[in-house]
Image: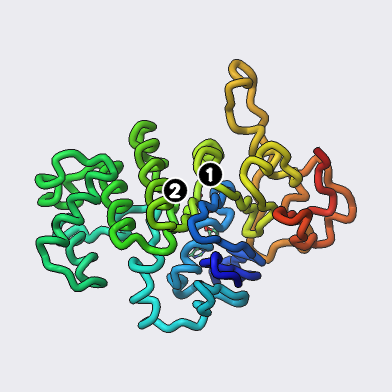
Amino acid sequence: MTDSQVLSVRNLDTRFQTQAGEVRAVDDVSFDLQKGEILGLVGESGSGKSVTGFSIMGLIDEPGKIHGGQIQFKGEDLINAGDKRYKRLRGREIAMIFQDPMMTLNPLLRIDTQMIEAILAHEAVSRESARQRARDALGMVGISSPDERLRAYPHQFSGGMRQRVVIAISMLHAPDIIIADEPTTALDVTIQAQILYEMQKLRQKHSVSIIWITHDLSVISALADRICVMYAGTLVEQGPIDDVLDRPTHPYTKGLIQSVPNRNSTGQRLAQIPGVMPTMINPDPGCRFMERCVYAKQKCADEPALVQATDDRQIRCHYPLVN
Ligand SMILES: Nc1ncnc2c1ncn2[C@@H]1O[C@H](COP(=O)(O)OP(=O)(O)OP(=O)(O)O)[C@@H](O)[C@H]1O
Ligand SMILES: [Mg+2]
């Protein structure tokens, strides 16, 4: 692990025991995150993006369990970090913006109380300066008249507004890592753009590293440095964002790109990947994408490994596309 590396995830394996069987939610996922880097984690619904985030945050509970792999934060092993360590870590060193803002907000407390407490939990500053910080943070995510807003309760906010409060809370401590789980999906485009801009500023000013989880390639392409593509719990391709989007080598990545509208496709039908994602309960051995892949051959029934294709690109496919 180099000094510039803040997070290293290796062979992460997270499973849930359900009545229907064991769900292999995250299966052999590996990636690194550098200081100040924005990593996009993309994949369709149910591909294991949130569970990857929860695993890093130490938030996998029964019936879920991390079965194997390593998660290292600045050289520190997190898989075996206890509750006490995680309590200090969460919010201050690694913050997660959850898909559902009410996972962060307490419905019974005013926004100011929650934000001030979040600051005071980790820092010995006066209440007044904590309040000022809270006010500034709300301003950063485009909430006008923050003073008045601070006195409100979560239910007095719209969904998009609540999401912005949660984003503001995640930025309070300028943590080393922010894991942002679809944070702007529910927001209108101008607010989205403002939040992406604030995130980029945060990265420039404080070298915050960001894992941006989304199924929206257009958001990622404007924001991220690198991309990890997940499919049915596995990581199928990763590399520098422009490189991967211009020259995808995994058939799934290519399909994903073709299903996104762009300027050239106006009036054209978008290509959809036929079929649906397979179940992750006792998955068949072999490539998970095989059933839907137009390039699949017999060998694809053997599980492909994630291999280093070039210095900065990895792929899990027996027949990578040549561009
Ligand atoms: N608590 C749980 N119990 C059982 N299975 C779970 C649990 N949480 C997640 N899973 C399963 O793990 C898999 C990955 O889920 P995850 O929430 O990570 O997907 P995702 O990529 O975040 O999808 P989305 O884009 O819809 O948010 C899914 O098959 C899901 O059903
Ligand atoms: Mg999710």
Residue plotted at (29% across, 46% down): 164
Q: What residue sits 59% from the left and 77% below the top?
A: 67
In the image, 266 versus 167, the foreground residue is 167
The amino acid type of the residue labelled 1 equals: His
Q: Is residue 304 left or right of residue 150?
A: right
The x and y percentages for residue 1 are 60, 72
Q: Residue 256 in the image: state x and y as whole percent.
A: 64, 39
Q: Check whether the beta carbons of the residues at disc 2 and disc 1 lie within 8 A of each other.
A: yes
Which quadrant of the figure has residue 249? top right
From this view, report whether residue 98 is shown above or below residue 193: below
Find disc 1 in the rendering and name its residue: 215
Picture disc at residue 58: none
- In the picture shown, does residue 116 fall above or below 189? below
Q: Nearer the viewer, residue 3 or 178?
A: 3
Q: Position of residue 267 (x, y in %)?
A: 60, 16
Residue matched to label 2 = 182
Which of the pair 221/216 is nearer the observer? 221
**What's the residue type where badge 2 is placed?**
Glu
Crowd band around label 2 with a 10 angstrom C-alpha radius: few (<14), some (14–19), many (20+) = many
Which residue: 38% across, 73% down? Answer: 89
Whether disc 2's CB lies below 8 Å from ligand 2 is answered yes
Q: Is mark 1 within 8 Å of ligand 1?
A: yes
**Whether residue 151 is visible:** yes
